[in-house]
Amino acid sequence: NDLSTGWFTEVFQNEGTAFSLKVKAKLHEEQSEYQKLEIYETETFGNLMVIDGCVMLTTRDNFLYHEMMTHPALFTHKNPKKVVVIGGGDCGTLKEVLKHPGVEEAWQVEIDERVTRLSEKYFPELCESNEDPRANFFFGDGIKWMADAAPNSIDIIIVDSTDPVGPAEGLFAVDFYRNCMVALREGGIVVQQSESPLLHTDSIIKNVQKDMRDAGFESVRTLPFPQPVYPTGWWSATMAGKNHVLKYFREEDAEQRPFVTRYYNKKVHQAALALPQFMRDILHTE
Ligand code: PUT
């Protein structure tokens, strides 16, 4: 990345495209035990976190992703009490989870503690629930954590990972989903961030759905949503239910939610359940 131009650019080599943000300053750079971490101050999107050259989040638009990774699943489950976030070191997903008063215990299982420490400094608004007595933090390998989790002990697992290359690849795998299936209680739900509908429906999304079904989840659904700073500006979350049909959600509770959201609401959730025709054709689903 040549910052002498005043722009940070993430190049999507395979797609022949790129995304740029005008930056004011580089605030931080380090090589952690696991990855290269960078923080920039941008002209119009607030702070920007970059991991190994890929945009992870900005102050301005992360609410879209964090809300859609969280609230559809929590309003689909009938009464989620224990929620585990695998990854999600910036604490944005954890913050959304803790907005639900019925949640009694939430875990964030992040491999790279430095991501959380940098988020505390540069994205403090995402970390404002970290002192909530229901919040628990484990810094270590999420794949191993899930393999060791007690059977029938979790209501919702949210896999808020980086892209499926390198260490995160093992989170997009049938063995991992099998362990999720064991760890979930009846009616439990696993949610996986599943990349761009435009770029990845015929590859990553299709494979995630297949792996989830092969792991024993009967009901699987992908919900698209906007995310301007990710490739194509369009992203997705794929949910799978343990003996739970995901077509319906607690619409009244979503409408009456006792907390503030900026993107999620009942109608947004309904709309996200409607797939574009090309996704229906590829995924052979309604
Ligand atoms: N947490 C999702 C990261 C995706 C970056 N392309």
Image (cartoon, rainbow, N blue to C red):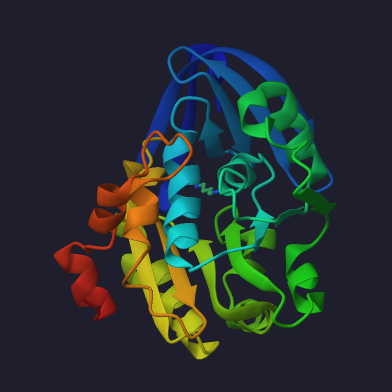
Q: Can residue 208 be spotted in the picture?
A: yes
> Image point 73% across, 28% down: which residue?
120
Q: Nearer the viewer, residue 108 or 112?
A: 108
Look at 48% across and 69% down and name the residue there.
78
Q: What is the quadrant of residue 17 in the picture?
A: top left
Closest to the observer: 280 or 9? 280
Residue 272 picture location, percent across and down:
28, 56
Q: Is residue 235 visible?
A: no
Q: Is residue 284 above or below residue 265?
A: below
Give above or below for 21 relative to 64: above
Residue 229 position, x and y percent, is 42, 35
The outermost residue toward the left is 277
**Quarter occupied by the C terminus:** bottom left
Direction from residue 119 to residue 24 in the image, left or right: left
Say above or below: 64 vs 43: below
Number of numbered labels in the structure image: 0
In the image, 216: left or right of 228?
right
